[in-house]
Amino acid sequence: MSLKFTGYQKFVVALLSFLQFTIILDFMIISPLGAILMPALNISASQFGVVVSVYALSAGTASFLSAGFADRFDRKKLLLFFYTGFILGTLFCGLAPTFEFLVAARLVTGLFGGVIGSIAFAIVTDLFPMEMRGRVLGTMQTAFAASQVLGIPAGLYFSNLWGWHAPFLMIVAVGVIAGIAIAIYLKPVDAHLKLQTDRSVVKHLVSTVTDSRYMFAFGVTALLSIGGFMIMPFGSAFTVNNLGIEMAKLPMIYLITGIATIFIGPLVGRASDSFGKFNIFTFGTILSMIMVVIYTNLGITPLSLVILVNVVMFVAIFSRMIPSQALMSAIPDPANRGAFMSVSASLQQIAGGIASIVSGFIVVVGEDKKLEHFDTVGYVMCAVAFVALIMMYFIHRQIPEGPVKH
């Protein structure tokens, strides 16, 4: 029988989901703005890759450096501190007049925003047992859907009206609301403080990074982030220039896809708890490989088919993301949970940033503005996904999931 959520647990899930909405939107908005931003700032595909990757690289660096003290403070206070910095960084993005200023602003945003996901994930692991985490993480993925349904279409609409700066200012306004809610309503999350030893911050970090139980998991985490970072940054430019979809119809694609993902996330989370997290991850990996090959080899395509392909791709993405996060959450000891999550987030973001840069050098914008060699990026992603599947199998064997319900 499935465990029931308490009223406060439901509130925490809703609050963290709202917070995740702003974080995800800040990162995701760059991709659909690519088709507008590149000509507006007169930058190349490789320079746009830098705009995307600098956030990931700075976020990864910040996550790694924060690992040593991630378990030394109340997680609520850490969350509030880094979220405030994230909002300020996003404000600088909204005021950026040049490519160089935008890169610097994305760097600042990443330094603070990159730590937030690991803190939120640690809070989830602290407050929810393994048997509930699939449903929790599945529900939190509705933040991704909300960014698709509400944020990205609205961001594109306002960018068409007032320029590409407008979406960032919109995120700041929403982010302030989320920050106030965290400060007022989230209870302290400090039970882990009783489990701490007298180790220094550096020793705590070193012991986490060198723990043999964790090192393999860190490698899997890094691999899982590569595929999305290679393909996602060029999604809007590929859709407009290669698939022949008008810029004005981009919001419709994100809107319909986002509505679908509102239902996909919770369903995948529930399936992960019911049928086994590794089983769902395997399904998602195979489907991802199939859909990436199809997507990256498309030519001029009807709008309805583009939407269908996007929806199925998100089924695959969530079917990898949600169960893998749930499995990884069972690996660290409670006393090291924050450090483990921070190092994992660091490796994920750094690997993703490098992947984005590599993708920027593989993809070339032709004279007709079409992206060339995008199919090569798809094949690389498939190879990485296959290796990650094999490695995740060994992770799965070490983690008791409890009885699988049919």
Image: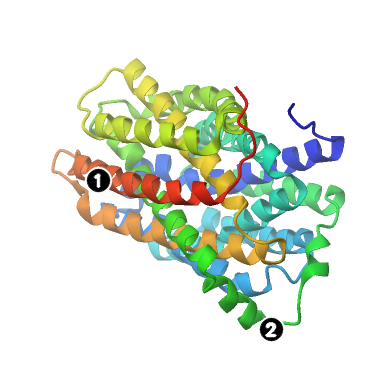
* Vertical order, 103 against 209 (above or below): above
Question: Mark 2 highlights which residue?
Answer: 200
CA–CA distance in space, label 2 to label 1? 43 Å
Residue 115 location in percent, x, y? 60, 61
Q: Nearer the viewer, residue 390 or 139?
A: 390
Looking at the rendered structure, the secondary structure element under dot 2 is loop
> Given the image, on which type of amino acid does mark 1 rest?
Val
Q: Which residue is drawn at 54% across and 48% down?
A: 26
Residue 60 location in percent, x, y? 50, 64
Residue 86 in sight in this render: yes
Query: Which mark is first along the chain, 1 or 2?
Result: 2
Contact check, label 2 and label 1, Cβ < 8 Å:
no
Question: Which corner quadrant of the image does residue 151 belong to?
Answer: top right
Q: Of the numbered discs in the image, which one, if any, rests on residue 377?
A: 1
Q: Of the numbered discs in the image, which one, if any, rests on residue 348?
A: none
Q: Specify whether 65 is left or right of 3.
A: left
Residue 55 in sight in this render: no
Q: Residue at x 55, y 34 (%)?
A: 276
Residue 250 location in percent, x, y? 40, 28
Question: Which corner quadrant of the image does residue 35 belong to?
Answer: top left
